[in-house]
Each structure stands twice: as structure tokens, then as C-alpha cells.
Amino acid sequence: MSVNIMVVDDDKLIHKIIDKHLKDQFALQHCFSGTEALKQLKMNKPQLILLDVEMPGQNGYEVCDAIRHIKSLKNIPIIFLSGKTSLREVMLGYEAGADDYLVKPFESDLLLKKIHIHLQHSHEREELSHQKNQAEHVAMEALKGFSELGQVMLFIEQSYSITSLESLSSRFFALTNMLKLNTSLMFTLHDNAQFYSAKGLVKPLEKELFKSAKDTKRFVDFGCRTIINYPHVSVLIKNMPLDNAENYGRYKDLFPAVLGAVDAKIMALIEQSFIIEQAKKMTSSFQAIKETLVSLAGTLNTNTEKNKSHLTAMYNELEERIPRLGLEEDQEIYILNLVQTTLDKVNEETYDADTTNRKLAKVLITMQRLVNEQNHIVEEVQKESIYINNHLKNEDKADYQMDVELF
């Protein structure tokens, strides 16, 4: 069955351009105003909507907001078409409920790519819905009977044994689901961002919001949404209870403690990964030392045998020629004994000095490299430890005040 896409724009030229590039792959439904689009949606539900921002009457933000308030249409992917690119415009689009933002004029390949991504996103969301409901049920059963603060303490305790980002995000979402909060996460490791969502997938627009707000301030509030930033983790809370000041304040007190633990755990995972990598390098270096020493021993043995062979040949030749020199018997015995004594000493001590020195130099260089790598590990661990102490003891106290009542 052909995928139905609704195009909402007051510019007929845009309709012609979109029709040219999409008509062979999709069934297109054209609307020239927001009012017309809302009427058509009551009769025909598309799989995706391309929505212009600036239109006479209802603008795109208003139309998008109206669509999101219709239960049967709230999950339809909506891609805004606009000539504006500011962060303010993007945030307005996200606030209205859009899934993505495409700047006019746009390339046809980019338009097709975004359409396919969001259609796939919509399909995967439906498949994940059943799994999500099951996961929420299991999480709620496991967390039943504990207070919010108790759950935060339990989360922090459990985070000590977590060994992967997937497990860390899963435990985090179990906690936020218990609090009835819809959240997404961004983990930052070595300047690379990884995204996780309680709903299974993170929208492209959410990723842009995470990145835009990352280096601003600890709390970023817009509407009922709040982004909380830590060095290695950011959380987007999508349904902060604006109508309940007590709950709102309590969540803002609880989450810094939770995210502080998450951030510390991520730093520990980074440190663990770094130490493991350094351990592999050290193992490789030690293996190189072993091979060098084995080679050195072989060379020494070979040279010793060669020298022994040459001296033995010289002794045999002297033993044969001395009787022809007309020496007294005691002189012959003295010369042969002297040569034999020298031969015995050389057999014990001879070696190729140049080769030995070169190979020993390689051993020394490798050992120095090992020492430098070990020192680097110590420095990194010390820097991370100092950062944790300063970050948790000083910076957090300056940004917010913990005010959790235990009794």
C-alpha cells in the first residue's frame, strides 16, 4: 500500500517541487492552508506531514500544536518547512511538537532522506510500543512500595555495579518511569554523543536541542521541558509538572543527585576503558621485551659457539705445528697450556659486544616507554579524581541547593 504524505504550504511552487520529487514514491495530499489541512485530517490520516511554518491565518506552529492535541494524530511525523534557521525557531518547532526541521530551499535528496528516516522511526515506534509497555510494567512492579528518595538512593547504589551505558540508561529510565516522567538522555564520551530515550528512540530535533543546550547552563527550562546538563550526561525531561510547584521543586532537587551519580559512573567507565587500553599496550611492550631478550640470548649463544670453534681450530693447528719449531718439550707444553687456558676463558666470556649493546639499548628504550605510559595512567587517574572531588563538592553547591526532607 502506498504511503500517504500530506503537504501543507500556501506556496503553489513548493507543492510543484515536492510533487515532482515525491509523486513516484508516495501518494500526496495537497493542502494550501492550516484550516484546510485540519479539515482533511478528520477524513484522511496520512503517514507523514510536511508543514510550512509561515502561512496566512494559522501558522505552522499553531497547526502542529492542534494536530498534537488530537489523540489519533499525535504520533504522525511532522517535518517543518521554513526559511529560518535560528535556535529560537528550532525550539519553537520542537515546543509545538514537530519531529524535524527542513530549511527552504532544500535538496530533494535531503527531503527524501528525512522522510524515509521518520517513516522508519514511526514504524519502529509502533513495534517498540508493546515492549515499552511490558518494560514499564516490570519496572513499576520492581519499584512498588518505595518512596521517591528511596528509589534515588537505590539507583545510586545499583549504579556502582553497572558496566555499560545501556544498563545505566535502563536503570535511569526505570527510575523516571516510576516518577511518571518522560525523559531522554545524552551521554558524552570523548566528544562523541550517544542518545537514549524512555520511548525507545530520540527524535532528530531532540538531539539538536541537547547539543545546543550542552554548553549553556546547568538547568535549561522551556515550557514544561527541562534540560539538565552535567559534563558527561544531559537529561531532557519532557513533562515537568508546571501545575504542581511542590513536585516541580522536588524533581529539581532529586535529579542533580541522580545525574551526579550517573556522571561519576560514566567517568569511571571512561577511566576503566582507558586503563584497559593502557594495559594492552603494556602487555604488547612486555612481549616485545621478551622477544628481544630471546633474540639476544640466541645471538650470544651463536657468537660463543663461533668463537669457541675458531679458537679450537687455532689450538689444533698449534698442536700440529709446534713440534716442527724445534722447541724444548717444556716450552711446547707451556705454549699449549697457555693457549688452552685462554681458550677456556674465551669460551666462558666471549660475546659480540656491538650486537649486545644495540639490543640492550632497545630493551632500555622499551622499558622507558613502559615507565612513561605508567606515569601517564597515574596522571589521568589523578586528574579524574581531582575533577570528581571538585565537581561534586564545589560546582554543584554553587548551582543548586539540595533540599530533600528524609522524614
Image (spheres, rainbow, N blue to C red):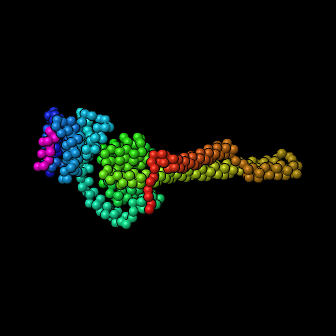
Residue in the picture at 18% in, 39% down: 58
Q: Is residue 20 visible?
A: no
- Magenta includes 42? yes
Outermost left residue? 43
Q: Position of residue 22 (x, y in %)?
A: 17, 41
User: Image quadrant for the C terminus?
Assistant: bottom left
Q: Quadrant of residue 96?
A: top left
Q: Position of residue 29 (x, y in %)?
A: 13, 43
Q: Position of residue 121 (x, y in %)?
A: 26, 50
- Main secondary structure type of the part rendered in magenta: helix
Of 69 and 1, nearer the camera is: 69
Horizontal side of 329 relative to 361 (left or right) equals right
Horizontal side of 285 relative to 234 (left or right) equals right
Horizontal side of 24 relative to 104 (left or right) equals left
Residue in the picture at 43% in, 51% down: 256
Start-end of magenta stretch: 33-43
Of 320 and 69, nearer the camera is: 69
Q: Is residue 54 visible?
A: yes
- Magenta includes 34? yes
Residue in the picture at 29% in, 63% down: 134
The total number of labels drawn is: 0
Horizontal side of 96 relative to 275 (left or right) equals left
Q: Position of residue 344 (x, y in %)?
A: 76, 53
Residue in the picture at 12% in, 45% down: 39
Of 187 and 69, nearer the camera is: 69
